[in-house]
Image (spheres, grey):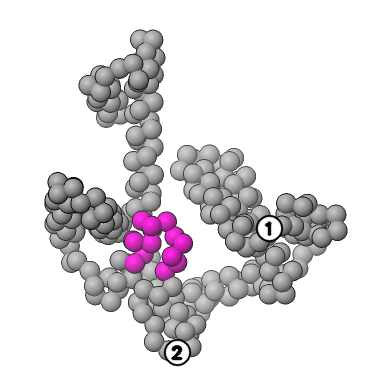
């Protein structure tokens, strides 16, 4: 696949050594696809975090960690006689060529919007092919293991392609208010099980609204998380200047410092 001096060859060799039944690492030898999967997801999030913070040095390291996950899964598959790293690389190369006929073929696409439509059409054809030509639903193939908000956005995006969608953002906002009212009613009635279900409906509509606003819901929520952490840190810092902690202050005091943090963020 590549020369022994190549960094990728070295990485593949290291993984093979770690998994070697004779002289390898006991922990690595015991791992399976299922036990490694959570680490794969975690590393993908750490890549996203480095990008969010603009830390390119850490991004390099995190991309290496993510690459290791691919190598790990490929090695276990090779040991089971299923496929190897080269097969993985060939498969994604073939897919990229297949999904970019305007670059590697004769199709013409004028802009990114047109390319997105063409991309989804090709993916739909691939899904149909995998089903053996039998019936397949518009929502087939959306992974259950995705973060719930991300999966909600993907489900609504798929449904929208076949016409099941609100025409405008205003109608999504109307639905959001409707779901909020239903949630409030169940809480007031003391129906906590029903309230939890209504909360799920509310979050689903929020994911749909994010799609309408052309933002990934996970990205929007990460931004809100960062904002909350930043403003709460301001509260803690201001209280520390007075020799106090949040536990030693009132909610009204903390609300005032929260508003102070908001005001500072708005200043140029």
Disc 1 residue crowd, few under 14, some 14–19, many 20+, Cα 10 Å: some
Q: Quadrant of residue 86?
A: bottom right
Q: Residue at x 57, y 45 (%)?
A: 59
Q: Which residue is mark 2?
A: 133
Q: Of 218 and 177, which appears nearest the observer?
A: 177
User: Dividing the picture into quarters, in which one does residue 140 lie?
Assistant: bottom left
Residue 31: which disc?
1
Residue 203: name its quadrant. Answer: bottom left
Relative side of 26 to 127, left or right: right
Residue 141 is labelled as: none
Cα gap from disc 1 to disc 2, whole angstroms: 36 Å
Residue 199 visible in the shown view: no
- Tag count: 2
Is residue 158 rendered to the left or right of residue 77? Answer: left
Q: Secondary structure at mark 1?
A: loop
Q: Residue at x 53, y 71 (%)?
A: 96
Magenta region includes residue 144 = yes
| Residue at the image position 24 percent from the left and 72 percent from the top | 164
Picture layout, residue 159 above or below residue 268: below
Above-or-below relation of 60 to 208: above
| Residue 111 location (% of width, % of height) | 37, 67
Image height check: is 159 above or below 212?
below
In terms of secondary structure, where does tag 2 sit?
loop
Residue 18 coordinates in the image, percent (x, y): 77, 55
Residue interval drawn in magenta:
142-155
Mark whose residue sits in front, 1 or 2:
1
The quadrant the C terminus occupies is top left
Residues 251 and 103: in front is: 251
């Amino acid at each position: 696949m590549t020369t022994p001096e190549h960094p990728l060859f070295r990485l593949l060799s290291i993984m093979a050594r770690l998994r070697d039944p004779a002289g390898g690492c006991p922990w690595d030898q015991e791992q399976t696809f299922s036990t490694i999967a959570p680490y794969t997801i975690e590393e993908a999030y750490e890549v996203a975090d480095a990008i969010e913070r603009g830390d390119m040095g850490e991004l390099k390291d995190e991309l290496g960690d993510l690459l290791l996950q691919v190598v790990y899964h490929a090695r276990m598959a090779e040991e089971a006689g299923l496929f190897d790293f080269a097969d993985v690389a060939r498969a994604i190369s073939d897919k990229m060529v297949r999904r970019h006929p305007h670059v590697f073929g004769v199709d013409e696409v004028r802009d990114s919007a047109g390319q997105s439509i063409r991309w989804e059409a090709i993916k739909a054809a691939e899904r149909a092919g995998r089903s053996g030509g039998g019936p397949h639903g518009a929502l087939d193939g959306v992974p259950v293991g995705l973060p719930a908000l991300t999966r909600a956005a993907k489900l609504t995006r798929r449904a929208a392609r076949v016409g099941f969608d609100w025409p405008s953002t205003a109608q999504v906002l109307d639905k959001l208010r409707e779901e909020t009212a239903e949630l409030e009613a169940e809480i007031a009635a003391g129906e906590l099980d029903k309230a939890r279900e209504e909360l799920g409906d509310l979050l689903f509509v929020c994911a749909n609204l994010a799609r309408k606003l052309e933002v990934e819901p996970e990205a929007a929520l990460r931004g809100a998380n960062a904002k909350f952490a930043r403003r709460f840190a301001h509260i803690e810092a201001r209280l520390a200047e007075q020799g106090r902690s949040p536990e030693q202050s009132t909610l009204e005091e903390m609300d005032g410092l929260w508003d102070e943090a908001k005001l500072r963020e708005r200043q140029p």
